[in-house]
Image (cartoon, grey):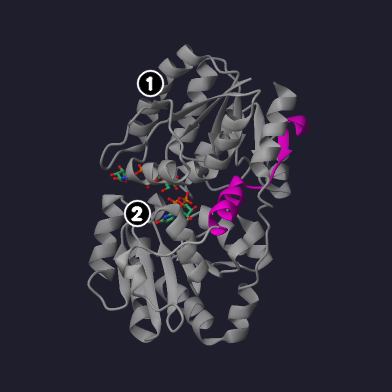
């Protein structure tokens, strides 16, 4: 069985790394890894940590790239690789433009696609944008759907996907998380080394979504600045995404302030350790909504919706919206009301047990 895995951004790489490693170790599998490098530095951080060396690197990233640029360059770049390698199946992950464009390119070669992290939905095509459309279109193309949860399977069944093509596996992010969180680690970053995590309450922040750019991001950052101004024992740590638009806005509102640390993106191992030592998390990231429940860390999701209701139902994640006052009030409750905090800080595992990659490999073996 020849399996080609394709990914291009940081979260896809983290979530595909455990699976690609399994494919490489399997004696009955020929594994080919193609990265689009829709992200460059943030992808390379993950490749290095998990010791993955791509067979093909399309190196498509451009500063301030548009969606059309990513999509066109991925389709064009991957065609050649597919024609040369002729894999039995192409694995894509999640909902990025790399995901959709690679799935479409594989379809053009009539090569079956396996979709890892299938079946997440908000049912709003513009939120998250363009990810909701990317995943819906990828579901239409895919021949095998690896759904993290039972709810994801139900979403796919409602869209007419056949039961026998859906495999509920858990989310591979938990495979990655458990591997990395289990290893001893000490911070190397100067800002992190100098924080006394025992006496300070650290709030980890990330924010980067396209649909939040502009007014919403300004609201989110202002609420975070308000928190730092009001609570003197709080330290904000924000590893800022390399998107120049995000960096500019973060610097403008949160820069040069005491107890707000704007740092470069962290590699996955220091980042997991930062989450584990934090009091709580404010984010618009998808992946962190899946990781935080396993770590028992409350998460305020600064978005208008979430495709991860399992984490909300489990109690760890709260949808905080994109309005300054609302975000501030929920964060204030977490900082001032111990019972409110305790309710959200219980470790639960709605996204799996760390065996998702193994289940995906088994399903592939049975099919091919
Ligand atoms: C992309 C995905 C989004 C995912 C996110 C994870 C799409 C449309 N969006 O969004 O689903 O949640 O990645 O982070 O697929 N940049 C660098 N170096 C890097 C990475 C990014 O300089 O290593 C800069 C570049 O200027 C690039 C910009 O960030 O043009 C935006 O990157 P892009 O992949 O287009 O969008 P993201 O917002 O990162
Ligand atoms: N992450 C990381 N370093 C950072 C910030 C995040 O390794 O500085 C990890 C995080 O733990 C999660 C993933 O990157 O696994 C989330 O990626 P991102 O926020 O880029 O994308 P999203 O989850 O929103 O798709």
Left or right of 120, for residue 251: left
Of the numbered discs in the image, which one, if any, rests on residue 76?
Answer: 1
At 44% from the left and 36% from the top, the residue drawn is 97
Identify the image quadrant of the N terminus. Answer: top right
Q: How far across and down, in percent of the image, does residue 21 sit?
A: 56, 36
Ligand 1 shows up in the quarter that is top left
Q: Can residue 294 be seen in this view?
A: yes
Q: How far across and down, in percent of the image, does residue 131 sit?
A: 48, 43
- The outermost residue toward the right is 164
Under circle 1, the secondary element is helix
Q: How far across and down, in percent of the image, does residue 176 sit?
A: 56, 49
Q: Mark 2 points at which residue?
A: 241
Question: Distance of mark 1 from mark 2, alpha carbons?
Answer: 27 Å
Which segment did they paint magenta? 160-182
At 73% from the left and 47% from the top, the residue drawn is 150
Q: Do the residues labelled 1 and 2 touch (CB within 8 Å)?
A: no
At 64% from the left and 40% from the top, the residue drawn is 357
Mark 2 Cβ inside 8 Å of ligand 1? yes
């Amino acid at each position: 069985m020849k399996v080609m895995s394709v990914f291009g951004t940081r979260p896809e790489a983290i979530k595909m790394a455990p699976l690609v490693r399994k494919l490489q170790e399997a004696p009955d599998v020929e594994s080919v890894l193609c990265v689009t490098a829709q992200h460059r530095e943030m992808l390379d951080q993950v490749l290095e940590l998990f010791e993955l060396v791509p067979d093909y690197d399309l190196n498509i990233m451009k500063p301030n790239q548009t969606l059309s640029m990513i999509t066109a360059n991925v389709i064009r770049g991957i065609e050649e690789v597919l024609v040369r390698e002729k894999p039995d199946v192409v694995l894509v992950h999640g909902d990025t433009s790399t995901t959709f464009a690679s799935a479409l390119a594989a379809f053009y070669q009539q090569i079956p696609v396996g979709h890892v992290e299938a079946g997440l939905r908000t049912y709003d095509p513009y939120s998250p944008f363009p990810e909701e459309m990317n995943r819906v279109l990828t579901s239409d193309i895919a021949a095998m759907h690896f759904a993290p949860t039972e709810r994801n399977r139900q979403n796919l069944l409602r869209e007419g996907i056949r039961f026998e093509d859906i495999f509920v596996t858990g989310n591979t992010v938990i495979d990655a998380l458990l591997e990395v969180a289990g290893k001893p680690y000490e911070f190397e970053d100067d800002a992190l080394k100098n924080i006394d995590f025992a006496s300070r309450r650290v709030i980890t922040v990330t924010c980067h979504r396209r649909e939040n750019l502009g007014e919403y991001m300004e609201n989110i950052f202002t609420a975070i600045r308000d928190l730092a101004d009001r609570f003197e024992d709080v330290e904000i740590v924000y590893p800022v995404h390399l998107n120049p638009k995000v960096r500019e806005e973060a610097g403008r509102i949160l820069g040069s302030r005491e107890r707000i640390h704007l740092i470069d993106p962290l590699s996955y191992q220091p980042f997991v350790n930062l989450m584990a030592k934090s009091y709580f998390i404010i984010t618009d990231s998808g992946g962190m909504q899946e990781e935080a429940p396993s770590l028992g860390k409350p998460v305020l999701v600064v978005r208008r919706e979430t495709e991860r209701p399992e984490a909300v139902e489990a109690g760890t994640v709260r949808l905080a919206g994109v309005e300054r006052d609302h975000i501030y009030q929920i964060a204030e409750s977490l900082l001032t009301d111990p019972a409110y905090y305790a309710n959200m800080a219980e470790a639960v595992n709605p996204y799996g047990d760390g065996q998702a990659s193994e289940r995906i490999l088994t399903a592939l073996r049975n099919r091919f």
